[in-house]
Image (cartoon, helix red, strand yellow):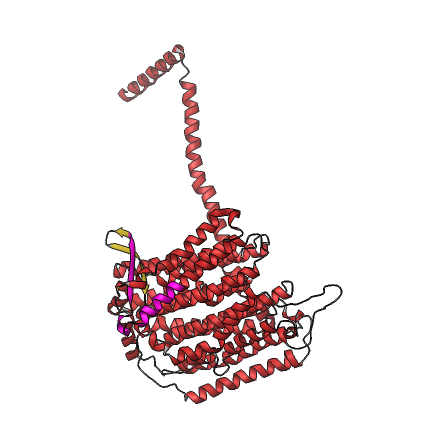
Amino acid sequence: MPGTGAAGRLEAGAAGAQRAAEATGAAGLVWLCVAVPLVSAGILLVAGRAADRWGHLLAVAASAVSLAVGAAVLVQLLGLPGGARVLDARVYHWIGAGGLSVDVGMRVDPLSVTFVMLVTFVGTLIHVYSVGYMAHDPARRRFFAYLNFFVASMLLLVLGDSYLVMFVGWEGVGLASYLLISFWNQVPANAAAGKKAFVMNRVGDVGLILAMMAMVAHFGSVDFDRVLPEASGASTAVLTAVGVLLLVGACGKSAQFPLQAWLGDAMAGPTPVSALIHAATMVTAGVYLMVRSGAIYAGTAAAQLVVAVVGAITLVFGAVVGAAKDDMKKVLAASTMSQIGYMMLAAGLGPAGAAFAIFHLVTHGFFKANMFLGAGSVMHAMDDEVDMRGFGGLRAFLPITWITFLFGYLAIIGFPLLSGYFSKDRIIEAAFTGQGVKPWVFGSLAMAVAGLTAFYMSRLYFMIFHGERRFPTAGKGARHPHEAPASMYVPQIVLAVGSAVLGLALNAVGFVGWLEPVVGRAAHGEPVLPVPVITGGTLVLVAAGVAVAWRMYAAGEVPATAPRANALVRAARRDLYQDAFNENAVMKPGIVLTGAVAALDSHVVDGAAEGVASGTAGAGRLLVRLQNGYARSYAGYMIAGVVVALIVALGTRL
């Protein structure tokens, strides 16, 4: 098991900050991955209703072209020796201001290409699924334009060769998520959910902007080729400040504590949006940022620890919330929060953990997209109902959705030999590696949450597909569940296969070694517990979680309404009062502060300006009376002036 000691961090810092060579061949055309879906989005937005009949097909084709280009780049990279797999494709010169120079360029390396393949492959499947899911929506063309824009922005984010180019994609993803989450904005709650996600992401973006400012101040650049190789020579204080600011940005984008409150509300968008945001794109961006910036964190143990602590808090937070929700999409949202927490924890463990974070990110992209699309099929069959207490027994009506969802569910709980078993368990092992008390804390939390994950995901699966049917099939409120069309279930089948075998395949081909040109090679260490004990303990907790869920929600009767619960469950149902905290700690004081500033502006700033204006106007009115155009008035003024002058002169003489 790779360790996280100082030697490992130093080695990773040197390897992970490798300078790039010039890209040629397919890698030199990697910009097409961004350009094609971006142009497609523009066409769909400006073509109007003329594109209603073929717009969705153009969008699917654009995403597929990006996938094909990405595959060609992957083949080229695989043909190079490990040390030569870092390439830059310069597109054009963008900014030249004093000593700051920024090009628009694409970084082609194992990390970015891994993301390109994940985003385009899963994204294309979601595009195909959306053809059927959005078939009757009058704004389908606009929906697909937003999907294309989302994919283009995410690809720019992961391919940009500098923090500033990455930031353009970062903001593009934020805009696209707002447009998609609030797509059905005729419902006020949906519009509010989009605004909430947008605002909370902007809070995180402040951290990323400040981090770039610090880079310019200290390194004179925001290019990866300048900042990362020179990080080893920077002071610990500078690296800590930059690392913590980068983490703030990652927390907003990846819904990590304390900026996680928007993620559950993001379920307001169409289900394919949920799959795209949660599986392959937006919420993984923060993990990408942490791993890409590994050379910075290699020089600051404090910032690295903060990353791990944030991840640990979030993985517990998401699991607790997920165990109490009855809305199946919100259970999956909480699950995403928790699984991203695993990845952030791993990213904070050093180079070994960073590789495992990306490993789990890739497998999670498949099984989480699989389950979200499965949830969409259930909604399609149940008239858009999401309350699991009104389901039960759907395996008899939706056999394809049932079996495909099964593979995603087994993968996420870490069932042996499925994808999650190979990726999440490696993070748990890494968490137990190191010195002092932290391995015991992080490792124990990671293992315990694995059992809790098994419980709430089993609860989800059993409440939907097993147990007694809890919905009428005749009479008032009757439901007639049926399987979705092929355009929806074929992507589910592909993702189910990935959920089953991808972890095994990536482990067999040495995926962790593939990432070494970016994350570096870590020194080896041993967990504080033997690996068989860690694996066995994790599986025991997983089995216990499944057994408890089976007894409560498959073998037992599920009440139609949620029963009264203790204080912890009530808190979890309300997202552990995260919205209440934000409202009282941030929103209300913010309203008071802005009210005070508005009053200051109105009464002091505006009052002063208006006072000057009023005084000037009054003086003008006085002068108007004096300058009346009558000669006798002017003669009188002159006589009065002479009299005053004589009085003054005489008074002075006396």
Percent x, y of residue 538:
49, 84
Q: Quadrant of residue 632?
A: top left
Percent x, y of residue 309:
42, 73
The reply to whether the magenta stretch includes residue 72 is yes
Is 9 placed left or right of 152 in the picture? left
Percent x, y of residue 431:
41, 80
Question: From what the image shows, is residue 439 above or below residue 103?
Answer: below
Q: Residue furthest right?
A: 475
Percent x, y of residue 517:
30, 72
Question: From what the image shows, is residue 357 above or below residue 156?
Answer: below
Q: Residue furthest top?
A: 632
Quadrant of the frame with the C terminus:
top left
Q: Nearer the viewer, residue 384 or 497?
A: 497
Q: Quadrant of residue 63?
A: bottom left
Q: Nearer the viewer, residue 463 or 582?
A: 463
**Residue drawn at x 52%, y 70% as measured from the top left:** 370
Q: Nearer the viewer, residue 375 or 614?
A: 375
**Segment colored magenta:** 68-94
**Residue drawn at x 63%, y 82% as measured from the top left:** 551
Question: From what the image shows, is residue 169 above or below residue 433?
Answer: above
